[in-house]
Amino acid sequence: IYFSFERQEGKEPLLVECSRNGIKVKIIRTGEIMEFADTSNSYVSIVNSFSDWIRNRSSAGGEYIVFTVKPSASGYINTLKGKITELKYQSGMEPVEEEMETVF
């Protein structure tokens, strides 16, 4: 999947892929990729790690999050979305098929 980001609000997108393998983030502005995974398959650990990382960014007003959500993330996506909302990030979700390749 290739994405085109066109917003007129001047905010930078963070592309966040959620799957059974964890959470991957692509910071579009820099191309940097972050990964949050836990070999024990503990979704609590994955969500907390991502939430801590995003909380420590000082750019909630200057970034927005685009979630691509694979079916295997159904166990934690609502918890993750709730934490992001609490942190005042704007976000949107796009469901994708499990086998679908992203730009990561």
Image: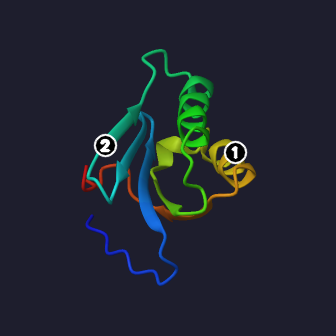
Category of crowding for the residue at label 2, using alpha-carbon neighbours closer than 10 angstroms: few (below 14), some (14–19), many (at least 20): some
Quadrant housing residue 35: top left
Q: Secondary structure at mark 1?
A: helix
Q: Earlier in the sequence, mark 2 or mark 1?
A: 2
- The x and y percentages for residue 101 are 25, 53
* Residue appearing at x 47%, y 84% in the figure: 8
Which amino acid does the dot numbered 2 rest on?
Answer: Ile
- The residues tagged by marks 2 and 1 sit, at their Cα atoms, a distance apart of 21 Å
Q: Residue furthest right?
A: 86
Which quadrant of the figure contains the N terminus? bottom left
21, above or below 29, in the image: above
Residue placed at 57% from the left, 48% from the top? 58
Going 39% across and 81% down the picture, which residue do you hit? 6
Q: Secondary structure at mark 2?
A: strand
Badge 1 amino acid: Lys
Q: Which mark is residue 72?
A: none
Residue 34, located in which quarter of the rendered image? top left
The picture quadrant where one finds residue 93 is bottom right
Give the x, y percent position of residue 5: 37, 74
Please give the label number shown on residue 33: 2
On residue 83, which mark appears? 1
From the viewer's perspective, tell me whether residue 25 is left or right of residue 33: right
Closest to the observer: 60 or 72? 60
